Amino acid sequence: MAKQLVIIDALNLIRRIYAVQQQRTPDASLAKATEQALTSACKRIITTLKPSHIIAVFDGDRCAWRENLYPAYKQNRSPMPIALAEQLETLKDHLLDIGIDSISAPNEEADDICATLASKAAKANYPVTIISTDRGYYSLLTQGISLYDYFRRYYVSIDEVETKFGIKINQLGDYWSLVGINSVNVSGVPGVGNKSAQTLLERYTNTADILAEAQPDKLVAKVQANSKALLLAKQLLSLKTDLKLGFSLKQLRYQASTP
């Protein structure tokens, strides 16, 4: 079997599966339907991608470092349904039954754990595929890491990202620090929207160059006047790739479950 690490952004997958089942299934059968749909999805992932190594990554209870920097981080999000939260440990057991172990860290987001795992494996010349619809992983595509959207059954490409945002993919962190990301309650620079950010990043390589401009026009001056918000957004919206994980790639080897 060719080597390949598949990293499942577990709650990204599970919450979407649960939402679909909520629309189709009576409450009394919802837990069982979610379990079956998750099992089916993961078996399809294994069949399609044929991983040599696989892991499901879950969020910890909170993201301590981001919340310490910015207490409003993700405060606009609806909490996970109680019934689903209570089912998570059972779902992890079912993942293990089909050969997929689960990991999390108490004060870390799955995004940073996935990014660290993917970056370390890619540096060790392991092909890596992350299963997620989270656009926060787009920046990892520059490292030779693949991003697979299970629900649309396709790989996200660098060309697609660049066309979508109208910038070079290596400017993505700068773009988000300018416009913010509403889904995590991070605002960016007041008054700078998508078009303004695109204009700025056509003229400047990155936000550091914008802040260093000695003869700013009105738009650049707006960014410079809000440099604190810009730099905070960039820090909050950047993935960590250097977490200490405490396990080796060997421990993630996939072994098909026996009937």
Image (spheres, rainbow, N blue to C red):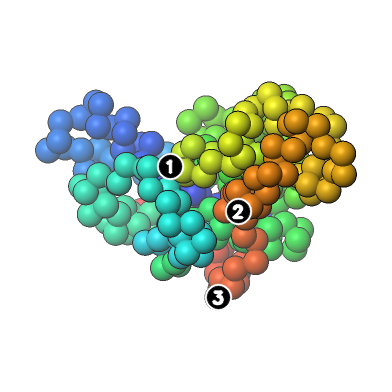
Foreground: disc 1 or disc 2: 2
Q: Residue at x 56, y 71 (%)?
A: 245
Determine contact: label 1, label 3, CB under 8 Å. Answer: no
Q: How far across and down, in percent of the image, does residue 80 sit?
A: 30, 46
Q: Residue at x 52, y 44 (%)?
A: 186
Which residue was labeled with disc 1?
13
Q: Secondary structure at mark 1?
A: helix
- Identify the amino acid type marked 2: Leu
Can you name the residue that lies furthest to the left here?
28
Q: Secondary structure at mark 2?
A: helix
- Identify the amino acid type marked 1: Leu
Which residue was labeled with disc 3?
246
Q: Residue at x 75, y 61 (%)?
A: 123
Q: Which class describes the residues within 10 Å of circle 3: few (<14), some (14-19), or many (20+)?
A: few
Which residue was labeled with disc 2?
232
- Identify the amino acid type marked 3: Gly
